[in-house]
Every structure is written in structure tokens, then in C-alpha cells.
Amino acid sequence: MHKKLNGRVLAGLVILSVVLLVAMLAPVLAPHDPYELGIPYLRPSAEHPLGTNDIGQDILSELIYGTRISLLIGTVSALTVTVVGTALGILSGYLSGWVDRVIMQMTNVAMALPSLPLTIILVAFLDASVWNIILAICITAWTSTARIIRSRVQQLKCLPFVQIERTMGASGAYIMLRHILPNLGEIVFVRAVLSVGSAMLTEASLSFLGLGVIGQKSWGGILHYAFFRNGIINGAYWWYVPPILCISVSVLGFMLLSYYGDGSAHGRDRKEKGNA
Amino acid sequence: MLIEVQGMSKRYRPRGPLVVEEISFAIDQGETLAIFGDSGSGKSTIGQILAGIYPATAGEIRLDGQKISYPLRGHARRQIQILFQHPEVAFNPRLRLIDSMREPYRLFRLPYTRQGLCDYLERYGIYEEHLERFPAELSGGELQRLALARAMLIEPSFLVLDEPTSMLDVISQAQIIHLLREIQQERQMGYLFISHDRVLCERFCTSICLLKGGRLEDPWRKSDA
């Protein structure tokens, strides 16, 4: 177990724990109401540690509340994408034949679509609500998970322990759930964790383009206003640098967490020790 | 005859080459037929078709005189089992061995008690402490004995042995062969022994066939020699 929790994973866990705590305790941690108007363009000070924006809103409070929307969209999208991608990958890889052909054709079509422009079009046509943004992110994001899972399942189903189950008459559903799925644990986990980071980046991009959730603070949204209301031209670094750092550090946290379980298998470490 | 194979052929892809071409053989109770040949000659394919893992492209298989078809059901599913070459992947690496050993009980609705399983496994040199481990924590010989024990749990009448000793050390090989002989004498089982080791085939089997390019040559019976 201790091998799975290496330094990189621990660093990722620390980063993500902080992000999660900030999101949960936003009303307690935020020094001001993020929607409260005040004196614009204040530089960082004791009262406003990260200064204020063009309408005098406290940027630290905006950032703290922005954590919630980024994390919510990131995790729900990743969960959906992982469940859909894993289920389709298992069905495609294990059942083969026409099921595989249909699922892979769907995957190829979805992969050929330019994901960001499609997401932008979808969000532009639908209301820019949290759930529509999640839907728009999920429509193309499941494909790579499905392809990777399918390849692994094709390998697994040829292994004797699966073939013996078939010889003993186990049903396809039983084999997929009891024997295939647990052996995909590490891949599914890595795909899920990386998907969170990817979904957070997409959400930030959408918000930066002004297609984010209306009426909610988000990191991409802060960047959007910093750019379109001349914060960057005016050199208001306290306005645009913190959201960039927040997005990067959070995505880095998920990247580091994806190293969990690197090179481990039940008992292998103990066996190697025993042989040494 | 326990098992009769008539004109069996196999191709994996619709217009692909025939891996196995119109082969016929029969195995009676208490007999062991060896099929030996080079790598890629189609030996394992024959075993996997008989075990119901893949369907044959052509030909027919009879068990106790009754035609069986893919996927195996009912009587045939219970009567035919297989032992593979690589014991380290014969068990789900994510499950403790006790859970893997419970699978036949679950799938065939056999009455299970932990003590009953432990008593049964003693014959195979496997003890309770082994069952709490994961497959990677046992040696190849131990795993192969456990795989044989699992196959025998449902009391099949025919066993496909797909190079069951080729990955084992000499002592483990001897243990497996000894167990297989004992079981065969007790239960008059039929074996299909797939191997590329001619010497082992001659010592262990009652008849031997050479498989070359997917075609089976006439069997050579030891009793005729």
C-alpha cells in the first residue's frame, strides 16, 4: 500500500484536499461577499489581499467561490465520462462482433468532431447552466476512455482466468462485472482523475469565452472579465494571475494523483521481496 | 466413446486461413490422447474448441455419443474442463484464491463449506493458508495444482490439458503428472494432452497424434508398439 502513496501522489492529495476544503468552506473563508461592489482596481492590501476588479469586487472572495463551480463541473463531468466510457469500452471489448462495430463507429465519429468548437456551439445554443455545460463537455470526452478500456478488455478476455469462467458457463454480464471490471481499476482511476483536470480546463475555456455559468463565480469567468474589461492591458496582475494559478495548480493536483497505483499488483511487491 | 471429433475445422476470421483442418479423433474413458506439434500448429485451438471457449467452423463433436454445440450447456458444460499452460493467469489476480475457488460452487450451485473445500484441497497439497493469498503470492506449481483442483471440483469426465507442465519446474511437473494419473485411475477420466514435448507424451499418454500445419496425422497407440 505504501508504494502506491508515493511523493507525487501525496503532493496531489495535499493540493486537492486544500482545493476541496476551500470549496466546502467558501462562505467561512471568503473575507467579503464576492458580489459586493466597492472601489474598483484596488491593489492587494490587508483588506483585499488580492485587490479588487473593475467594479470593486474582492478578487480573493471571487476565487474562493469560483473553486466550487470549477470543482463541481470537473468532478461531475469526469464521473459521467468515466462511467460511460468504461461501460462502452467493456461492452465493446468483451462482446466483439456487431456491438463492437457499432460502439467503435460511434467513438470514431465523436473523436473526429472538434471537441472545443462543438462544446462552444452546444453551450451557445443551450442555456449556460451547470448541467448544460457538463452535458456539452461529456458529449465528446468519453471517447478516449472507451478506446483505452476496450483494448485492455480485449487482452483480459483472452487470459485463462476469463476463459475458465466461460468454460464453467459464467454469463457474459457476470464475467464483465466480477472479473473484467476489477482488473480495470487502475486504468479507470487514472482516466477519471485525468478527466477531472481536462473538464476543469474546458470549463475554464468556456467561461473565458463568456460561455460559463451565468451568475456564478468561476476561475475562467474571472479571467474573462480581466481580459475583456482591460485588466490585462492596465497591468492589473492581481486580477488575472491568481485564477491562472488556481486552474494550473488544481489540474496539476489531479495529474499527480493519477500516479496512484503505479506498477502495483496484489502481492507482487511481497513476492518480489520474498524472492530477493 | 467419451469424446468423438469428426472433421473439425477452425478459422478465426471469415476469410482467414484454416488453423485446424478437418481433424478427427476419439478418446475413450481412461484414455489419454496426446496431440503434439510445433508452436502455432493449432494444438491449443483444438483444446479450446473442445472446452467450449471458441466454436468450431466445421465438423462435429460428440460427448458420450451426443452432439454438443457452442456454447456448451448443461451436461456438456459440467463434463468438460480445461487446464491451461500458464498457472499465474489461471486465477483472477484481483481475487483472493478462496474467492476464485468458490466460483465453481457458485456457478454450479454446489453446497459450499470452507472446511469442506480445505479437506478437498489437501489431496492437491494446498492448505487453508494458501487460500487467503492472491495468485501472485503462490508458486507456479502450487497454482497449477490449485487450478487442477478447481477443474476437478465439478467432477468432469473429460479434461483438456493444454501444456499443463511446460511452465513448471521438474518437481512440480512430476507432482502434476502424478495427480493426473491418480485421478484418471480413480475416475476413468479421458484426457486430451496438448504438448510439444514428445518424451512426456510417450510416457504419459495412451495414444499420440502429430499435428502439423493444422492437420492431424493418424494416432500412434502405445499398446500397438
Image (cartoon, coloured by chain):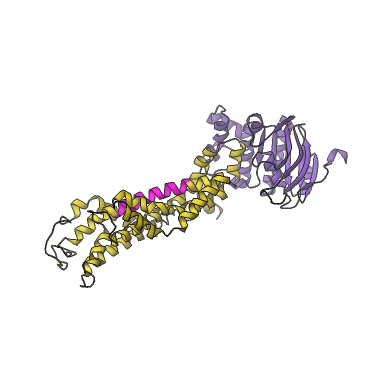
Chain colours: A yellow, B purple
- Decide which of A205, A159 is in the foreground and name it: A205
Where is residue B174, by image quadrant?
top right
- Decide which of B91, B122 is in the foreground and name it: B91
Q: In the visual, does A13 lie left or right of A165?
A: left
Residue B135, image x, y percentages: 55, 45
Residue B108, image x, y percentages: 58, 30
Residue A117, image x, y percentages: 38, 60
Residue B52, image x, y percentages: 65, 38
> Was residue B1 drawn as part of the magenta stretch in this picture?
no
In the figure, A212 relative to B59: above or below?
Answer: below
Q: In the visual, does B65 lie left or right of B123?
A: right
> Was residue A86 drawn as part of the magenta stretch in this picture?
yes
Residue ID at (25%, 56%):
A66
Residue ID at (31%, 61%):
A247
Residue lying at the far right in this picture: please name it: B225
Q: Is residue A191 visible?
A: yes
- In the rendered image, the quadrant that contains the C terminus of chain A is bottom right
Q: In the visual, does B169 lie left or right of A71?
A: right
Numbered marks: total: 0
Residue lying at the far left in this picture: please name it: A39
Q: In the visual, does A67 lie left or right of A76?
A: left
Residue lying at the far front in this picture: please name it: A125
Q: Is residue B204 visible?
A: no
Magenta-drawn segment: A70-87
- Decide which of A207, B94 is in the foreground and name it: A207
Q: Magenta stretch: dominant SS? A: helix
Residue ID at (23%, 59%):
A63
